[in-house]
Amino acid sequence: MKKKLSLLIASILLITSATACKKIPLDEYNALHSRTYNEGQTTEETNTSAPSDTHTTATGKPDLTANWSTSLTVTGEFSVSESVVTEPPIINVPNFVTGIQNGVAKYTNANVMNAENAAIYNIDTGELVYLKEQPKINPTAAVRILAALTALNYFGEDEQITIGTEVSLSNGTKLKYAKGTVLTLKQAIAASIVGLKGQGANDVAYAIAVNIARAYSKDPDMTDTAAVAAFVNMMKVYAADKLNLTTFEPANPSGYLDSKQNATMRDILTILAAAAENPTITDVCAIKTTAAGKTFDPTFPSSTLADNGGYAFARVDSYWYFYGLYTNKKGERLIIHLSNGTETNSKKDLAKMLEYAVNGIPLE
């Protein structure tokens, strides 16, 4: 007789109570959850790594289109009983989330910066230094950063990303890799966030989305459109569960203009702070990265970035969007964001922000 394996996993979301029962082989279950459990082992834990990694469809594949809350018990025969619960969500978020979302800015004079949107946040002290924003901001590259964070939440940086037909779904800047080109996830993130000459590649962001959704669902035949939709849902759940961004909903994996895709400055700062804490993202944004014959240089267009011990997460020429991370003389990391200004005035704003971030010169 097989030994019994009991596993309790609870992820909490508000939905209607329901029950179901199915068979899941132990090796498949381990692969699905990125865990290693042996028969006869008893484990209890809380799982909030939705979307739906504890609920599968009738085909046995993870359901990426809806969020489920389940309690699971796996027996020695790997029979799984599911019981959906209805308690409010319990979300454990990093400390910087509270500092950004609830902080009061040290400097409040809107005239300090010419751009419509500008912010400085000190990750290590938790101080919101400066904040100026329009009610709705197009998040652009912040969405690609969120896509990178989501992908790295489920897979390692060496996961393979194969360029396919999904790139035809993207708009905007493209690197136009040949179909069949294989990148690591880390290389694909470099292409999508940093790109060539500071312009991230939207087509590679779509390749990340489709490859990750198919790998997570174990469904290599999922259509491009369905895979993109599934990954966008994964992004939404990651943003809500890990970063407490409950109102920001990405519409696509690249951040390309969409009337439904708006964010606040605090949303963007939260995503950037999460990126600053992720070693894969900070690594590709701090050094030149080569992938399949293309070199991505985050110090473009000015050596000012490198000279001041900082580097850019992304820079988009046409709208003058800029995200950067800098270390001051105390060793504290400061995020700066600038968008929606003329190029001339934005360069002046950036210089002023660098003077504060690096040298501590007051903004007023």
Image (spheres, helix red, strand yellow):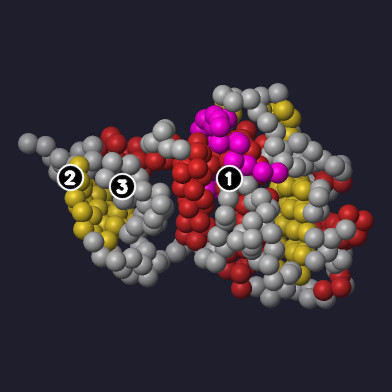
Q: How many C-alpha atoms fall within 10 Å of the one at disc 3: few (<14), some, or many (≥20)?
A: some
Marks 2 and 3, how far apart at CA: 13 Å
Q: At x 87% / y 43%, what residue is drawn?
A: 302
**Hey, what amino acid is under mark 2?**
Ser
**Hey, what amino acid is under mark 1?**
Ala
**Hey, what amino acid is under mark 3?**
Thr
Q: Is residue 169 magenta?
A: yes
Q: Is residue 161 magenta?
A: yes
**Sooner in the amino-acid sequence: mark 1 or mark 3:** 3
Say which element carries label 3. Answer: loop
The residue indicated by pointer 1 is 148
The image quarter in which residue 175 lies: top right
**Sooner in the amino-acid sequence: mark 2 or mark 3:** 3
Marks 1 and 2, how far apart at CA: 35 Å
User: Is residue 276 or residue 172 the one in the foreground?
Assistant: 172
Q: At x 56% / y 32%, what residue is drawn?
A: 165
Mark seen at residue 79? 2
Residue 32: horizontal and vertical position, in percent?
35, 41
Marks 1 and 3, how far apart at CA: 24 Å
Mark seen at residue 56? 3
> Which residues, given as a range, are shown in magenta?
149-172
Q: How many C-alpha atoms fall within 10 Å of the one at disc 1: few (<14), some, or many (≥20)?
A: many
